[in-house]
Image: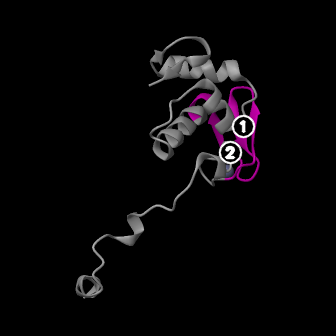
Amino acid sequence: MLADKLLSLHIEKNPYTTLPRYTYDQLKKGQTCAVCDSFALSVRGNKCVCEDCGHEELVASAVLRSVDELMLLFPDRKITTNLVFEWCVIFGFKKRIARILEKNFKIVGYGQWAYYE
Ligand SMILES: [Zn+2]
């Protein structure tokens, strides 16, 4: 019945597959909790702790989750240390992010123009 209704309305595309338009600058920056999506995370040692639900996650896995988000949301952008650093906000240590990226991705280029894939 739904199919008939959709056909009668000439809706060919499922409206739920259409994402709203967004730009990098519009989106709120910051690492979110893997469980409750809260932005209230703090770093304790090598772990991120959610202030809202108490969930703990290794910093490295949280950073990689952020990289996944960036790749999904902005497939055209190159993954650089600065971009990930800006996106996570919470991880004050740029060098730490660089190390995590180096360990998990292939570095292309050199110095401030280097990116990961
Ligand atoms: Zn949480």
Give coordinates of residue 98: x percent, y percent: 61, 19
- Image quadrant occupied by the N terminus: bottom left
- Image quadrant occupied by the C terminus: top left
Q: Nearer the viewer, residue 70 or 24?
A: 24
3D distance between C-alphas at marks 2 and 1: 6 Å
Give coordinates of residue 15: x percent, y percent: 39, 71
Numbered marks: total: 2
Task: Please name the residue shown 66% across and 42% down the image.
Answer: 31
Give coordinates of residue 65: x percent, y percent: 54, 38
* Element type at mark 1: loop
Give yes or no for residue 95 being in the magenta stretch.
Answer: no
Give yes or no for residue 48 being in the magenta stretch.
Answer: yes
Label 2 close to label 1 by CB (< 8 Å): yes
Q: Is residue 64 left or right of residue 25?
A: left
- Whichever of callouts 2 and 1 sits on the residue coming sooner in the sequence is 2
Q: Nearer the viewer, residue 18 or 1?
A: 18
Question: Quadrant location of residue 80?
Answer: top right
The label shown at residue 29 is 2
Label 2 sits on what residue type?
Answer: Lys
| Residue corresponding to mark 1 | 89
Q: Nearer the viewer, residue 55 or 88?
A: 88
The label shown at residue 23 is none
Q: Is residue 4 above or below residue 69?
A: below
Task: Please name the residue shown 52% across and 43% down the image.
Answer: 69
Q: Is residue 58 left or right of residue 42?
A: left
Is the residue marked by circle 2 packed among few (<14), some (14-19), or many (20+) residues within 10 Å? Answer: some
Q: Which residues are magenta?
A: 38-61
Task: Give the residue at the far top of this rendering.
Answer: 110
Give coordinates of residue 46: x percent, y percent: 69, 26
Task: Please name the residue shown 30% across and 86% down the image.
Answer: 9
Label 1 sits on what residue type?
Answer: Val
